[in-house]
Amino acid sequence: MPKTYSKSVPSSPVTTAEKPVRKAISTRTRFEIFKRDGFKCLYCGATPPNALLEVEHIIAVANGGSNDRSNLCTACQNCNRGKSDKPLTAIPKPLVEVAQEAIEREAQVVGYAKALKKIKDRIDSDAWTVAKVFMVRFGRDDFRRDFMQSVIQFLKLLPTPTVVAAMEIATSKYTSTEYGCFKYFCGVCWKTIKGAPNERQ
Ligand SMILES: [Zn+2]
């Protein structure tokens, strides 16, 4: 493009050195932006591995946009390349809001996993309480894995004291064989479940 200047237009005060230059964004900054934006294209929501994410300038460098993080966002390659067609209003949410959502989502995932772990730990602990009644009765120091799975299932359907009571009934009433005793225990549990299907709620 030939450099011609009209006399009616004042020449730009920007010197050559100050002209906006598209500086390379470091890998570290890039990943920080991705992390802040939840590794998701802010335009279409695409995520890896389906999308190749890039960091783009919200206000183009050519239009005076800076390399400041507030001017950077995550975009998939397709959206980034088609950016010239998109007005700035195409950005669905303020970046701060999106970042907060990402933090919230992360916290929720962690929180949800912790809650599930707590329930699992409680059931595991309760299952051993039930198993101990059986183990003491038969003088064992172990408990069959398949029996344990059944106990865990009953603990998901019935209150713990009910399951413990069922094992106490079984170990006092049916002692000829271990297998028979356990079957009896299962029978008591099922009878309770059928009699009071919503008891756990
Ligand atoms: Zn996209």
Image (cartoon, helix red, strand yellow):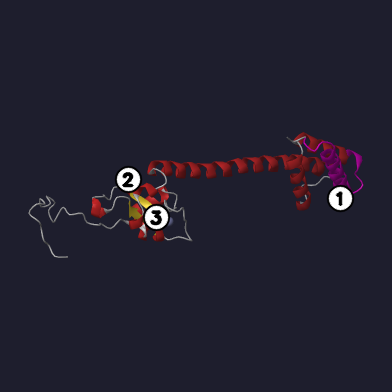
Magenta highlight on residue 174:
yes
Kindly report the distance in space between the C-alpha atoms of the residues bearing marks 1 and 2: 67 Å
Question: Sequence-wise, which precedes: disc 2 or disc 3?
Answer: 2
Cβ(mark 1) to ligand 1 < 8 Å?
no
Location of mark 2 (residue)? 70
Q: Which amino acid does label 3 sit on?
A: Ala
Secondary structure found at label 2: helix
Q: Going by the image, does 80 lie left or right of 193?
A: left
Q: Is residue 142 visible?
A: no
User: In the current view of this chain or complex, which residue is farthest to the front?
Assistant: 8
| Residue under the point 50% across and 42% down | 107
The amino acid type of the residue labelled 2 equals Ser
Say what amino acid the circle numbered 1 marks.
Answer: Tyr
Earlier sequence position, callout 1 versus callout 2: 2
Q: What stretch is highlighted in magenta?
A: 172-198
Q: Residues within 10 Å of mark 1 (few under 14, many from 20)?
A: few
Q: Is mark 1 on a helix, strand or loop?
A: helix
Q: Which residue is drawn at 39% across and 53% down?
A: 74
Find disc 3 in the rendering and name its residue: 75
